[in-house]
Amino acid sequence: MQSMNFWRAYARNKGAVIGLLIMAVVVVLGLFAPLIYPESPWDMVNAPFLGPMEEGSLLGTDTLGRDIASGIAHGARVSLLIGLTSTAVALVIGVTLGALAGFFGGWVDDTLMRFTELFQTIPNFVLTVVLVAIFTPSQGSIVLAIAIVSWPPLARLARAEFMALRSREFVQAAITTGQSNATIIFREILPNSLSPLIVSSSLMVATAVLLESSLSFLGLGDPNAMSWGYMVGAARTVIRQAWWMSFFPGLAILLTVLALNLIGEGLNDALNPRVARKGKA
Amino acid sequence: ADQPARGGTMNIIVQPEPPILQLGLNQQGPTQTVGGKIYQGLLTYDKQLKPLPSLAESWDISPDGLTYTFHLHKNVKWHDGQPFTSRDVIFTTTKFLPEVHSRARANFARCESITAPDDYTVVFKLKEPFPSFINAFEVASAPIIPAHLYDANTDYKNNPANATPIGTGPFKFKEWVKGSYIHLVRNDDYYKPGLPYLDDIYFRVIPDAASRALALESGQVDQSQYNDIEPFDVARLKSQPNLNFTTDGYEFVAPVSWLELNNRNAPLNDKRFRQALMYSLDRQFIRDKIWFGLGQVATSPINSHTNNFEPNLPKYTKDVAKAKALLDEMGLKPDANGVRARIRFLVMPYGETWQRLAEYVKVSLKQVGVEVTLENTDVAGWVQKVSNWDYDMTANFTYQYGDAALGVSRTYVSSNIRQGVMFSNTMGYSNPKVDELFASAAKENDPVKRQALYSEVQRILVDDVPVAWLLEMQFPTFVSKKFNNVITTGIGVNESYESVYMTKR
Amino acid sequence: MNAVAVSSSSAPSPVTAFPNRQPLLDVRGLSIALPPSADRELAVDALTFTLNPNEILCVVGESGSGKSMTAHAVMGLLPVPSVRVAAGALLFKGNNVLTMSEPEQRALRGGRIAMVFQEPMTALNPLMRVGDQVEESLRIHTDLDRTARKARVIELFAQVGLPNPAELVRSYPFRLSGGQRQRVMIALALACEPDVLIADEPTTALDVTTQKQILDLIRSIQAERQMGVMFITHDFGVVAEIAHRVAVMRHGKLVEIGTADEVLNRPSHPYTRQLIASVPHAMGDRPPFTPSGEPLLLAEGLHKTFHVGGGLFKKGKEVTAGKNISLTIHPGETVGLVGESGSGKSTLGRSVMGLMKPDSGRLLYKGTDLLSLDRRAFRPFRREIQMVFQDPYASLNPRRMVGEIIAQGPIAFGEAPAQAMARASDLLAMVGLDASAAKRFPHEFSGGQRQRISIARALAMGPSLLIADEPVSALDVSVQAQVLALLDDIRHRLNLSMLFITHDLRVASRVCDTIAVMQRGSIVEMGPAAEVFGNPQHPYTQSLIDAIPGRGWEIPADLSHGEGVSA
Amino acid sequence: MAGLPRFLAGRLIKAIVILFAIVVINFLLVHAAPGDPAMVMAGEAGAADPKFVEQLRQQFGLDRPLLEQLATYVSHVATGDLGFSYRQQQSVWDLLLARLPATLVLTLTAFVFALVVGIVLGTLAAVRAGSVSDSAITVLALLAYATPIYWVGLMLMLLFSVQLGWLPAFGYETVGGGLSGFARMIDIGEHLLLPALTLGMFYMAVYARMTRASILEVRDMDFVKTARAKGLSHGAVVVRHVLRNAILPVITVAGVQAGHLIGGSILIETVFAWPGLGRLAFEAVLQRDYQVLLGIFFISSVMVIVFNILTDLIYSLVDPRIDLAR
Ligand SMILES: Nc1ncnc2c1ncn2[C@@H]1O[C@H](COP(=O)(O)OP(=O)(O)OP(=O)(O)O)[C@@H](O)[C@H]1O
Ligand SMILES: Nc1ncnc2c1ncn2[C@@H]1O[C@H](COP(=O)(O)OP(=O)(O)OP(=O)(O)O)[C@@H](O)[C@H]1O
Ligand SMILES: [Mg+2]
Ligand SMILES: [Mg+2]
Ligand code: NI
């Protein structure tokens, strides 16, 4: 019954529905990339510098004759995988720290928040670049670096939620009925702080996809994984001769990030309706 | 062209900005290009690497190949007005260079004595014959340094004179605005009357590759060299009406690039595997699509411009079937995923082109069932890993300095397997026959016999494939059509430019 | 306090004196449509009434009855397009406001008709000096020059009783107290000498003492300028205090209108009667409480100081919320803790609950000092001491079913889940809810019902002492009365002791045996309810009681029992 | 404003603590990086005999205990010594200083553009909430928000420089053009247009969305009702009451982001060959020149801190409720 309400609220936002459709296409593309393009996207399957629709190549080929359409399909896997895993890692770090800070307050909060502030002071893209460069690009190091720069907002959000909820009367009530800290954190507070966290993390997936593509653009992607950002970055130098090499992968990033943002807004509408309740005497 | 006439200013790109202009103390490319106009060596070399006079007017080599006598120009003056004499040459070759210049140190260590019978004669006596000795006297290998400024103080690196370099060359140091330009002016007291023609040379610092291309196109600078222009921009600039393009002038450095293979690690320790590697690469494709046509497929360990190159060697062309057959023969059968072997490739951290190469190698080897994993590092990590032999495969290139004994043998002889030392025999290739051939060739005075020895070693190496040679690399030089006589010798842009002149319009 | 204290039940309303004068405001068949998503179609339904010069018309009605909507419609402040006037006319001195052009409406707004809002804390622009905010109104509606305007603002501030007006004009709102801000709002409203003043619950957010001052101010200014005032409130005490005429609204409809005397003392409509019956009042039939046995709870010399806003590098300021507090509660006794906002009432309650540790003092429960216990040792006492919270919307976990919410305490103390759930059903029945409620989520219940669930949750633990922190202040009067009756009933049945925290003295007088009055962290007076109310000793207590609005008015005898409680 | 010196002192202490932490992070990263700097120096000097390497190690203190090295590092940073780039054969600090002006010109222009255009668009959208122009602005902002900026840069370059030839495709100024004074400023301005536009685009979208949301929120606040009840016209209410309050949160976020713009400038400077810190960072990435990267990391953190302090100061000027001394 609640899920029906959720759907109705979500579907009221047309953009969110469009976002979901685009995302579905991207996910399908990523999932079935090895079936649609069994060859590795690195394979030089055709003549280099073919334009779109030339010699049976849908979106053209790049400077070494690698198929761009295949790269986009396989790149979807990389982007989504990195986007999702890094968000998951950031969530774990952010929510844990934020929850601890918000729940226990006092010096725990103080220490954790100074720590968070430090990470917020450091320009996050620069930090990602430095981390990935130093720990050598691999899917693992990229995920970790993105997570390391992404958790602070989640921690702040979780902290704010926990602080607010902690002083909420139903949590106080749980304390007065003798519930343990774990019960209070996991059964009373966490479920109630979930919806803003879900909304933020859906947006964070988008940011992570962008971050990954930016890293790859700079040549800091996993050298063994074809990603969209890599494709744009590698084609940058020949943009005067071959616009398609950077155009299509860029478009893929744009659509994916757009879709994730639209979904985030839809979730926001559905999960955090602005309750204009005036509890007044 | 019309008659050479005095006058004119030339703007040359310099990139990166050299740390210092004292050519004895630093031999980076940019230092050479600028310093080559200020300092001079005893000799220079033409495009066939035949010695030409520079500070030495003439020279003779004793028939036993042990005594080299140089006769110096007589009316040469340092830029500060002091006369140039054999004392400077003795100081440079016995004290200064052995202290600060590793390549020169190795060369002059071969001398039993270096003496000056008079002010204008210098005699080098070798311990044993070394015919390549004559190839070690150009301005970067052995720049002559003013003894009167350096002899008093042995802390050469901190000598105040380093800031205002004093040489004998056709151009004098005038001004250096760090981060912007280096200004050289005509040396009016140059010992060749009427030369040089140009009044000024500005070396402009343009850190950004795209800006450099633009500056050339728009005529704001007149010359670029080495890596100033990215390979992908070359085709476009070649068609610019205001520019001349050449890849000449690098005969002396004559770089060869290769895939460096760690001969210690299985399966790379098997000759057949290395040959299979050669058969799986389309090196013409590498030249055309990755280096955008710059370079030549290398057929030998020795660059075709370097002395003693052997043209008649077996050639490797892409042949997947042959490669697979070799692997089969080794017993490397494809597993369920079609993989016969797995190796790591340490990507050379020198920019995108090398990255592309790594990607290409990965795909090419996959076609024969070798799975390559790419690894990235920084320069420090790369140097450390390669020099400590902690790699399977990487890319590399070296300069050959015009001579197999000076620039080639160091890569292959087993005496140069030195852990922790870069540009040594880092792949650990060891073949007593090769060692012996290189050793006897180096001291063989008879050019015909020498060629025979070098041809034989090339044949063995090509069969052994200690490294997978890729290209005889070429660097693009663009020069404005306004300037004449620019690239005339085998040291190209490092020349003194004494005879460069500008066409008046 | 003030000489103008006319009790409306005795003085005739001015309107009866001048029956033929043209009304200032004539509302005819006004209907206001709500957007489709709203809970009902019309916020205001065919409303007709008039406001005459020189009278105070009080509009009363429960929350959501459309009072504010009416006021906003008059001001032209409806949030169009989602809410709009669907039918009717709004005549100001005979001209229909609704058909006027926008510039004409603007000239009326703030010029001839002015308004004061409920929340003084948010009704002023936080980034603008208060003087400038008032001056802005003068600039629009008058052609006074700058200096004249400035002088006029200072004059206005003096009129509304703001201290040191010449300096205060340069203050920002955040520096002023709630009462001062409300005075600024009134000065702003009066700036252009309007004919009509609309005040939408202007005192609801204020302490009783401040409320009294503001009411006095409005009344005196109204009388002085012969304005028509439309005063919106839900508090019958306030109505009794200032109204000449009263209009009662329900679900957007006018149910009754008449002179204050008629409506307050002889209400005709059943809804009005029910509302008035719900107004809290002391229960005359309550037997005086005689303490027996050992005190259940004994607080001695409690101190609590908060440090706010400090950090690693800066020192915060200190707030004293508890100063040498001593208090006893005997078995079966209900102690009322009254005092204005911020006096430290909740702090004391929370200390007893172990939700907060006072800095010093003793807190003996059945002889054990609760303050000496650590978390674990305190745990057994959680069963003994339970709490009912203020906000029925915030005190129940929206993600858990009601049954679970009630049963979770006993389960945490080792009761078998099945048994605890069964008992939860019983408790629901006891607080007057259906047993099926256990399987529903809190958001499916009304405020009053939620407060019943809260009570059931507290009772599930089988407490001896119940702490109720403003348990009814978030509820409408009629619902308030029901919940208070429930608490009273349960207290008797289970022989509970209760610490009842409230800022509403009328509520306290209704349910408490003993009253403790708090001011700035100290208990200034404590004694049997009848004595404290009848013969207050401390000046602060006196001022509090003095400030209760409508004290002169007695609820009609026929309504003082029974009718208040219904669905 | 009596609290100003105290506020600045407090912020300075805080900044120093944060900077210290960043320096320590830097140090740890230097040590986590693979490779031995001495070896590279030796290797690139072409004369890497083990004795020479050892000598260099001693010279650079690489043989000392870790804590001592940290102390040395910190003291070096304190004197502006951020290490040495072996690739570029220059001190990192010199490299950074040479590139800083170009980056500041770019980021500040982009920032001002983003802020002004963002707030104007956001206000337009909010004032006409629900209209066609609101939807158009919202869609535009969403697109600008979702597009990778480096790609926008490439596409704009393709359009305006390659196809139309209106603007220079890259670079900071016409190299060696010998321009000076006003002509040079115009020249730089032409070069600046595309990169600044691109870099500002993303933030413009952020500010437009924030301004819109903020205005819609403030519009429902009680004091706005008060202002309307005074009889103020719609426009006057928006300008005098709504906007000022709505802009506060935008300022806060903008201030934080101004410092972070330098991250975005890595991408934009790469695309447009803008000779700033970002471009330097890219070159450093390609060559894995960690020393330079860490230097950029340090200097950009300093910029963030400076901007944060500036934001707080500006904020306190706009909002009387903020008492800096507290
Ligand atoms: N902007 C709005 N959109 C939709 N419905 C609204 C809006 N504002 C008020 N309502 C609804 O209109 C009805 C009347 O509201 P109004 O604010 O006039 O009540 P009220 O009598 O002033 O109540 P209270 O005492 O709580 O202030 C309520 O049902 C309310 O939910
Ligand atoms: N957790 C806290 N941290 C800091 N200050 C607090 C805290 N709790 C309460 N205070 C302060 O202590 C004082 C007393 O607060 P308390 O909540 O006890 O007052 P109260 O009498 O219950 O008021 P109200 O009627 O508004 O509920 C107030 O000034 C309040 O701001
Ligand atoms: Mg209301
Ligand atoms: Mg309270
Ligand atoms: Ni009674």
Image: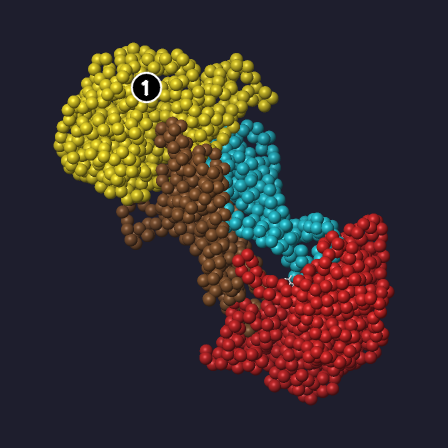
Chain colours: A cyan, B yellow, C red, D brown
Residue at 39% in and 39% down: D85
The residue that label 1 is drawn on is B405
Q: Label 1: chain?
A: B
* Quadrant of the image occupied by residue C177: bottom right
Residue at 60% in and 45% down: A93
Query: What's the residue type where badge 1 is placed?
Result: Ala
Task: State whether residue B401 is above or below residue D21.
Answer: above
Assess disc 1: are there few (<14), some (14-19) or many (≥20) residues with their C-alpha within 10 Å of its C-alpha. Answer: many
Front residue of C551/C47: it is C551
Q: Secondary structure at mark 1?
A: helix
Front residue of C66/C311: it is C311
* Quarter of the image where the C terminus of chain B is located: top left
Q: Is residue B398 visible?
A: yes
Residue at 18% in and 27% down: B86
Task: List x then y, in percent, for residue B345.
Answer: 48, 27
Residue at 51% in and 24% down: B343
Front residue of D189/A219: it is A219
All told, the count of numbered labels is 1
Q: Is residue B3 visible?
A: no
Task: List x then y, in percent, for residue B422.
Answer: 40, 27
